[in-house]
Image (cartoon, rainbow, N blue to C red):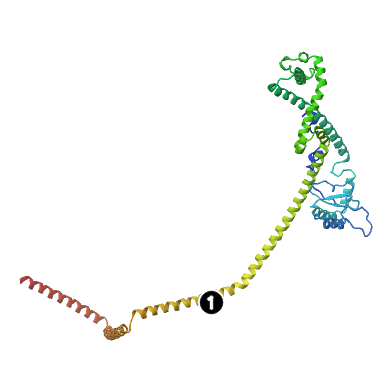
Amino acid sequence: PPRAWRRPSLPRGLLGVWGRFPSPDLPRCLPRPSFPQPQRRAGSRGFGARARAAVQGCGHRRPTCPPQPPRHCLGSFSCPLLCSWTDKNHQKSRWHPGISAHLEKGWKYYNKNPHFSQLLLSLSQHVDESGLSLTLAKEQARAWKDVRLHKTTWLRSEILQRVIQELLVDYYVKAQDTDLTSEDRKFHETLEQRLLVTELTRLLGPSQEREVPPLLGLEKADLLELMPPSEDFVWMRARLPLEVEEQLKKKCFTVLCYHNPSSDLDSETLKAAKVWNLAEVLAGEKQQCQAAKSQQKEQMVLLEKKSATYSQVLLRCLALLQRLLQEHRLKTQSELDRINAQYLEIKCSAMILKLRMEELKILSDTYTTEKVEVHRLIRDRLEGAIRLQEQDMEKSRQVLNTYEVLGEEFDKLVKEYTQLKQATENRRWTLQEFNKAYR
């Protein structure tokens, strides 16, 4: 875009207005407190009472007595996420959802600093609702007026240039498909030649401001030689508005058909009437979209607030349920353990009795009466033999006890007797072997 349409170099406070965004030097959303007068009458409510009333009145509902901020105060910053109500003068006021927290903080700060409201009232006489000084606000308004003027001028020139370029493009396309008349060919060639010379002249620029040599050594006098004849230029200039008007009409009809497809079958007169009101219709639809977008933002704020509230309620409910479960479990756990132990004890006793019954059943099937009698006789004999062995063992134990009384000399005699007996046995075996050998 040309230099005239570029964003002007505004102060940092003005940059916040560009695109309707808050200034980086200021908070995004500030409360709208109602400041008391320096000398308030007896019985009137102060800043703290009015702050409490504002806090109670907020919460996305219509408060009975909304606070009325002064005309110029720091608390009247605009914000798209606002609640709204209608005051007694049937004027719609808007309030930020987070105003309660700001007012509570402001009330506490006011109690510590009672002259804070006087300071804000004095500042409100020097700044506007956006936080800018009055002088800077006037300069900003003038700057925006110049920007809109330059923007409108540039858009007109840009639209005209693009329409002329589209005319030339359509001419090239038609020249490839059909044979054009001599007048059309003459018109487009003159227009193209004039446009090309004008563009080259603009690229060369003024000669007195040029410090480098011109492109290809060309001067404006060289370009003027390429201008079409004056008669052709006058004729082309007289026909050009009609062609531009026709091209713009086609574009308007295209936009109308895109916006309302049912208008494609209407006559040109009806289309022209609809195009005449198309700008107002589009502006109304844009306003509706912006209102719907603002309402959607408000609904999103409500949704986030409700989601946070519901989440906290659910967490509290879960904590309560967990506590109840723990208490119920502690109370019933001992009783449950006792019942389980009793059940397991009864079940084990039943299993033991069942095993004993199966054992007795197997024994009754295995051993008959005759086998039992035989086993009883065998047992009696074995018991008699065991008793005899026990008697012999008792006698041997008594003999050993008697020998133990004799002492160590008897042990030596026993060992000597054992050795002699072994030697006798060895010699007897040797004699038997000799006798066998000589036989």
The image shows residue 374, relative to residue 155, as above or below, that is below
Judge whether residue 430 can be spotted in this image: yes
Q: Residue furthest left?
A: 439
Judge whether residue 13 can be spotted in this image: no
User: Closer to the camera, 11 or 238?
Assistant: 238
The crowd level at tag 1 (other Cα within 10 Å; few <14, some 14-19, many 20+) is few
The image shows residue 376, relative to residue 229, as above or below, that is below
The number of discs equals: 1
- Quadrant of the image containing the N terminus: top right
The image shows residue 143, relative to residue 129, as above or below, that is above
Tell me which residue sits at (71%, 23%) in the image.
Answer: 174
Report x, y in % for residue 198.
77, 20
Specify the quadrant of the image occupied by residue 48: bottom right
User: Closer to the camera, 244 or 391?
Assistant: 244
Report x, y in % for residue 225.
77, 13
Specify the quadrant of the image occupied by residue 358: bottom left
- Quadrant of the image containing the C terminus: bottom left
User: Closer to the camera, 170 or 104?
Assistant: 170
The residue at which mark 1 appears reads as 342
The kind of residue on which mark 1 rests is Gln
Tell me which residue sits at (19%, 76%) in the image.
Answer: 419
Report x, y in % for residue 8.
81, 33
User: Closer to the camera, 324 or 181?
Assistant: 181
Specify the quadrant of the image occupied by residue 168: top right
Label 1 SS = helix
